Amino acid sequence: MANKQNYYELYRKSTIGEALTDTLEELLINQYISNSLYQKILTQFDKTINEALSNTVKAKTTFKGSLHTYRFCDSVWTFILENAQFKTEANEIVKVDRVKIVACDANVQDTPQK
């Protein structure tokens, strides 16, 4: 079989991802949908949100701050910055006390299935 693209599930923790998950859980509990449909919908959400952000978001920002923590595991970088400052292309500046940045390799794939 051909490789199946592995999509990150981290957007499930976004506002829209949590709203979708909460709604699906309610439908599942009330037996309006099956567990397999629940999983298929979440998998489709993972695929769609990753592709949409990859293909449509072209805005750039720069940032600086004090690096508090960093780690690299399973092709995912996690950075925690303190006293961070973000600057948009329109020169808008946003300051935050603490921010967590997660950067994932967009080219990660599952191994071929036998």
Image (cartoon, rainbow, N blue to C red):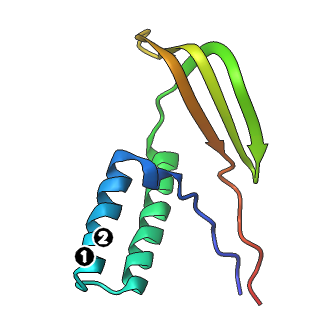
Q: Hey, what amino acid is under mark 1? A: Leu
Q: Is residue 35 left or right of residue 10?
A: left
The secondary element bearing badge 2 is classed as helix
Residue at 70 percent across and 76 percent down: it is 3
The N terminus, quarter of image: bottom right
Percent position of residue 59, x then y: 46, 29
Label 1: element kind: helix
Q: Position of residue 24 (x, y in %)?
A: 30, 70
Q: Position of residue 7 (x, y in %)?
A: 58, 62
Q: Nearer the viewer, residue 68 or 53?
A: 68
In the image, 33 versus 50, the foreground residue is: 33
Q: Which mark is residue 27?
A: 1
Q: Residue at x 47, y 70 (%)?
A: 43
In which quadrant of the rendered view does residue 84 lie? top right
Residue 48 left/right relative to 65:
left
- Answer yes or no: is residue 52 visible: no
Q: Residue at x 29, y 55 (%)?
A: 19
| Mark 1 and mark 2 residues within 8 Å of each other at the beta carbon | yes
Local packing at callout 1 (Cα closer than 10 Å; few below 14, some 14-19, many 20+) is some
Instruction: Indicate the position of residue 94 as horizontal and vertical percent values.
Output: 43, 13
Compute the Cα span from label 1 to label 2: 5 Å
Q: Is residue 10 left or right of residue 93?
A: right
Q: In the orientation shown, which residue stands out farthest toward the front?
A: 29
Q: What number is the disc on residue 24?
A: 2
> Residue 113, relative to residue 56: is it above or below?
below
Visible residue check, residue 53:
yes
Quadrant (top left, top right, bottom left, bottom right) of the C terminus: bottom right
Q: Residues within 10 Å of mark 2 (few under 14, many from 20)?
A: many
Amino acid marked by disc 2: Leu
